[in-house]
Amino acid sequence: MRWRRRRRPVATGRTIPSRAGLSVVEVLVAVMIFGVATTGLAAMTFWVGTRSGVARMANQRAGVVAEEGDQLALLPFDELTAARGCEQRAFGGFAYIRCVRVEELSPNDRRVILTVTPLVRTLVPDTLVVERARSRPYSPLQ
């Protein structure tokens, strides 16, 4: 069976009816718009992924500062000077440098300054200041 091709009438002064459907130009414009929109979404997705990684590391830094601060708060008063110095540590894949300074305010009061410096350059160091006092023994006779 042979298909017959309908011939379009030659323009002889009368208008040729347009066919239904899309032209090549319309398809190309649609593809260009889709490409621009997709590129914008890809850039935004990359930015969101980067920011979520930074937020995760900031949460880890806050947890490390809280844990290190708790350890210094529980340390006996006479052993605070032994905690001085800097050392590199890692906690759950989060690498940082922990520095502790102890300032003597009076014979019975000390200020402990804890600085946590992440080894990742996107995060800034965080500092915690704890003031400690020598506990006074309780005596009912005083």
Image: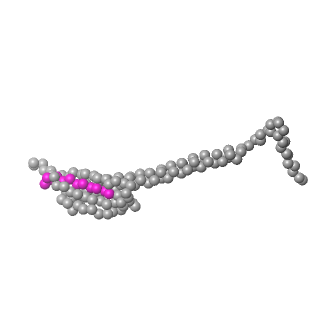
Q: Which residue sits furthest top?
A: 14
Frontmost residue, 137 versus 19: 19
Whether residue 18 is visible to the viewer of this picture, yes or no, is: yes
Q: Which residue is at 31% across, 56% downward?
A: 116
Q: Is residue 84 magenta?
A: no
Q: Which residue sits furthest right?
A: 1
Q: Which residue sits furthest front?
A: 13
Q: Which residue is at 70% across, 47% downward?
A: 24
Query: Is 49 left, or right, of 87 in this rendering?
Result: right
Query: Is 20 left, or right, of 111 in this rendering?
Result: right
Q: Which residue sits furthest left?
A: 142
Reply above or below: 98 against 45. below
Q: Which residues are magenta?
A: 106-117
Q: Which residue is at 80% across, 37% downward?
A: 15
Query: Is 108 left, or right, of 95 in this rendering?
Result: left
Q: Position of residue 32 (x, y in %)?
A: 62, 48
Q: Position of residue 10 (x, y in %)?
A: 84, 42
Query: Is 86 left, or right, of 95 in this rendering?
Result: left
| Colour pattern | one colour
Frontmost residue, 101 versus 134: 101
Q: Position of residue 121 (x, y in %)?
A: 37, 57
Q: Quadrant of residue 11?
A: top right
Q: Which residue is at 76% across, 41% downward?
A: 20
Frontmost residue, 51 versus 80: 51
Frontmost residue, 142 versus 120: 120
Whether residue 137 is visible to the viewer of this picture, yes or no, is: no
Query: Magenta region's main secondary structure?
Result: strand
Q: Position of residue 25 (x, y in %)?
A: 68, 46
